[in-house]
């Protein structure tokens, strides 16, 4: 009995997830475990007719961010994130492409020829395309296990009515093992079911459904698990990740940084940037973040965000000096890229220009 009580007290002492009302900020409850947080988001699928690959690159791809650029410049490009090819029929010249599509279908007015690129090279073109209607998609429910319910939630559960079980706009706050807020997820949640939990007396397992938002992609899970254990203590923890996972790391670093108060170092400070792993855009900003603010640090996630960070409040006061070691690696990978519409873009040179305009003297090594 003594061990059971001790385990319950230890479980109650670990609070990783807190469900709060986004309006008043009151807590519906807190727990240490959640099922259904990770899953497969809803992907959009396109069939490309008359597909013609360009260059000598691969005929298919997986896990890339791909821009679709119509010939009609007035229509503008749109992005498929985490894009992959599903099928390639050389005889019919067709290609199926799927990815995370914010438009949930072709933007209105998109017809005719479309070219595709991944930010580095043109992948190919099609004479026309169609959007494939998605199959019915049922997201897994979110189950908060071992939840210690707040008074407000207990009162709603006691009522048992549909209106009482509609929590409406809620936020799931997620903390790491150090108790620091890592990130949060907004949703419109409804109580689907609940039952007493085996985790301890007075605790419940609460099942939520409704509009729970996009689940955290499965490929993000290893990165989240690293951060949930606590913020990084050593530099370069992201170095072996692929571009998608580096983007996840960058998002978590940004969320953490935007909730913290940074003490700007005095002007004249010298920062050292380890450029050995800058092989893509997320790697550029992760290396900059570590140079300015240490392991897990953040200092912009795009050029506009870099400009904002250089204005103060993110650890750096200008003028300053940046020693950029192994700069040729970034120059090789980022000097010849493509913007959304396919226009040539030198991200390496643009970054140096932004730093120079902010009175950061960059010494390339």
Image (cartoon, rainbow, N blue to C red):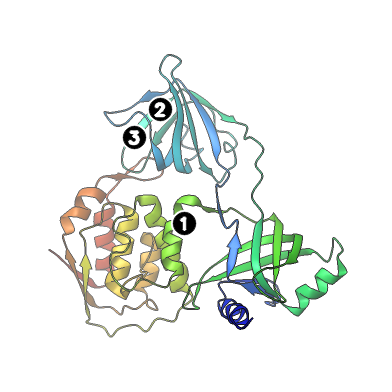
- Mark 3 to mark 1: distance in Å? 30 Å
Where residue 225 appears, x then y in whole percent? 45, 63
Question: In terms of depth relative to the viewer, which is nearer, 56 or 178?
Answer: 178
Residue underneath mark 3: 122
Residue underneath mark 2: 125
| Rendered residue at 54%/28% (across/down) | 111
| Rendered residue at 38%/59% (across/down) | 302
User: Is 138 on the left or on the right of 238, as rendered?
Assistant: right
Asked whether residue 20 appears in the rendered view, the answer is no
| Rendered residue at 80%/64% (across/down) | 165
In the image, residue 56 sits, relative to residue 148, either above or below, namely: above
**Numbered label attached to residue 221:** 1
Asked whether residue 147 appears in the rendered view, the answer is yes
Q: Kindly state the secondary structure of the residue where label 1 is placed.
A: helix
User: Is 95 on the left or on the right of 359, as rendered?
Assistant: right
Q: Quadrant of the N terminus?
A: bottom right
| Rendered residue at 37%/74% (across/down) | 311
């Amino acid at each position: 009995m003594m061990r059971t009580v001790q385990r319950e007290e230890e479980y109650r002492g670990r609070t990783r997830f807190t469900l709060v009302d986004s309006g008043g900020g009151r807590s519906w409850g807190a727990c240490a475990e959640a099922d259904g947080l990770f899953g497969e988001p809803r992907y959009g699928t396109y069939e490309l007719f008359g597909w013609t690959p360009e260059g000598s690159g691969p005929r298919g791809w997986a896990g890339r961010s791909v821009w679709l650029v119509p010939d009609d410049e007035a229509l503008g490009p749109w992005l498929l994130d985490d894009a992959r090819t599903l099928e390639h029929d050389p005889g019919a010249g067709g290609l199926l492409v799927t990815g995370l599509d914010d438009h949930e279908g072709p933007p209105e007015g998109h017809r005719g020829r479309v070219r595709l690129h991944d930010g580095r090279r043109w992948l190919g073109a099609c004479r026309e395309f169609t959007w494939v209607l998605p199959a019915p998609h049922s997201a897994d429910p979110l189950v908060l296990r071992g939840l210690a319910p707040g008074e407000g939630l207990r009162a709603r559960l006691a009522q048992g009515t549909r209106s009482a079980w509609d929590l409406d706009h809620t936020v799931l706050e997620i903390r790491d093992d150090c108790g620091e807020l890592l990130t949060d997820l907004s949703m419109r949640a409804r109580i689907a079911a609940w039952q007493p939990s085996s985790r301890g007396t007075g605790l419940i397992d609460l099942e939520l459904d409704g509009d729970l938002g996009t689940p955290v992609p499965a490929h993000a899970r290893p990165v989240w698990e690293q951060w949930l254990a606590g913020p990084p203590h050593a530099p370069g923890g992201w170095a072996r990740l692929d571009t998608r996972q580096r983007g996840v790391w960058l998002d978590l670093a940004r969320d953490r940084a935007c909730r913290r108060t940074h003490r700007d170092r005095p002007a004249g400070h010298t920062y050292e940037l380890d450029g050995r792993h800058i092989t893509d855009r997320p790697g550029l900003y992760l290396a900059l973040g570590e140079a300015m603010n240490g392991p897990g640090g953040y200092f912009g996630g795009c050029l506009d965000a870099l400009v904002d960070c250089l204005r103060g409040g993110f650890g750096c006061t200008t003028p300053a000096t940046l020693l950029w070691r192994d700069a040729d690696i970034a120059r090789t990978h980022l000097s010849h890229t493509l913007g959304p519409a396919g226009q040539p873009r030198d991200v390496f040179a643009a970054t140096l220009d932004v730093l120079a305009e902010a009175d950061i003297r960059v010494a390339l090594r």
